[in-house]
Amino acid sequence: MLNEDDLPKSIFHLYTGKSSKINWGPGNFEVEKNIGDGHFGTIFKVREKDSKFICALKMMFKYKTEKEELESEIYIQSKLDHPNIIRLYGYFQNYEKVILILEYIDGENLYKLRELKESNTFSNIITIGYVVQILKGVKYCHDNNVCHGDLKLENCIVDKDKILKICDFGHSFLISEGIRKIEVGTKIHFAPEIIKESKISLEIDMWTVGIMTYEILVGYHPFKNFPSTKQFSVRILKNEPKYPESINKDAKDFMSKTLIKEPSKRLTVREAISHIWLKKEINEKINEKINEKMKIL
Ligand SMILES: Nc1ncnc2c1ncn2[C@@H]1O[C@H](COP(=O)(O)OP(=O)(O)O)[C@@H](O)[C@H]1O
Ligand SMILES: [Mg+2]
């Protein structure tokens, strides 16, 4: 299984001020609460006993997780350092589990946050705030040849100040490695090229950016009501999403350009970040604020 010598060294000592030679283990942590039962294991909010440093432990059972997924989660995430990505500080393991030491976020994932809204949606401006942060995290990944591979609302954690961080790199892969496997991520978020079993690359993340944007702005999945997997696959390949009249026209343009079936025609993350939908309203808000200030002067 995971060979300690091959994997990146822990950087957790930088946060706790303890010796870098320490072998972290469960005895170093006090559990504060259970913060989530993920697909492969459980996530706890914990406190490192001596330094009182708060972090999260993600426990993953080896028998439930593909070796490849565990390794990419550790190898790839440990190299990423960006304000919109959960930091991986280190890991330890025993014969049955691998335990990741992660940055703790006092917040909720976007899926649960959306469920708390009566309309099941966020306003145009709040959606812009979240989409911009997702794109900043994705751009950093793509600039470093990393494809996240499983972007979805559940894998975006938002804190009390609405700062969003992308988590869960279990399906991530380096594009320099070429096509790693045909099926990546969560079925209902599969991009057309995954269904067609053709070559997959960074563009799959941009498809899921489009799906997530639609889900939080319109309130449901753009290819909703799929009774069987086959019908669902056909819808993804053939149907075009419908955009309600009430949706901002620039947002509609953004979604229709990320939900393009042909990966090479889809917006890249760089193009998406400079899309007018994300610029216009923010500029208008800034202008409003300036105008308010001018009135006082
Ligand atoms: N570092 C963290 N801080 C706070 N909450 C977290 C953290 N990591 C995960 N969570 C919560 O736990 C859930 C599952 O975590 P995730 O890493 O996606 O597990 P899985 O690989 O099982 O999907 C997330 O949707 C989020 O709500
Ligand atoms: Mg997850």
Image (cartoon, rainbow, N blue to C red):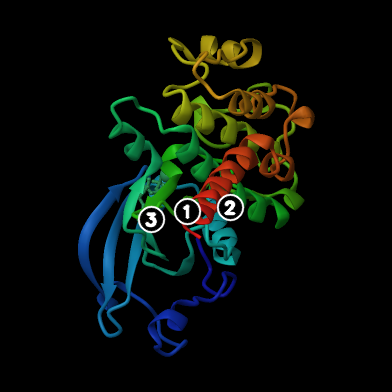
- Of label 2 and label 1, which has the lower sequence position? 2
Residue density around tag 3, few if under 14, some if 14–19, many if 20 or more, within 10 Å: few
| Mark identifier at residue 161 | 3
| Closer to us: 262 or 256 | 256
Measure how far apart labels 2 and 1 are at the Cα level: 8 Å
Q: Is label 2 or label 3 in front?
A: 3
Measure how far apart labels 2 and 3 are at the Cα level: 17 Å
- Quarter of the picture for ligand 2? top left
The amino acid type found where label 1 is placed reads Lys
Estimate the x, y position of residue 287 in percent, counting from the top left: 58, 47
Residue underneath mark 1: 165
Image height of 180 relative to 241, above or below: below
Estimate the x, y position of residue 62 in percent, counting from the top left: 41, 53
- Residue at screen point 32% across, 53% down: 107
The amino acid type found where label 3 is placed reads Asp
- SS state under label 1: strand
- Of label 2 and label 3, which has the lower sequence position? 2
- SS state under label 2: helix
Q: Residue 248 appears in which quarter of the rendering?
A: top right
Residue density around tag 2, few if under 14, some if 14–19, many if 20 or more, within 10 Å: many
- SS state under label 3: loop
- Residue at screen point 44% across, 11% down: 225
The amino acid type found where label 2 is placed reads Gly
- Tag 2–tag 3 contact (CB < 8 Å): no
Measure how far apart labels 1 and 3 are at the Cα level: 12 Å
The total number of labels drawn is: 3
Q: Is mark 1 within 8 Å of ligand 1?
A: yes
Residue underneath mark 2: 137
- Tag 2–tag 1 contact (CB < 8 Å): yes
| Mark identifier at residue 101 | none
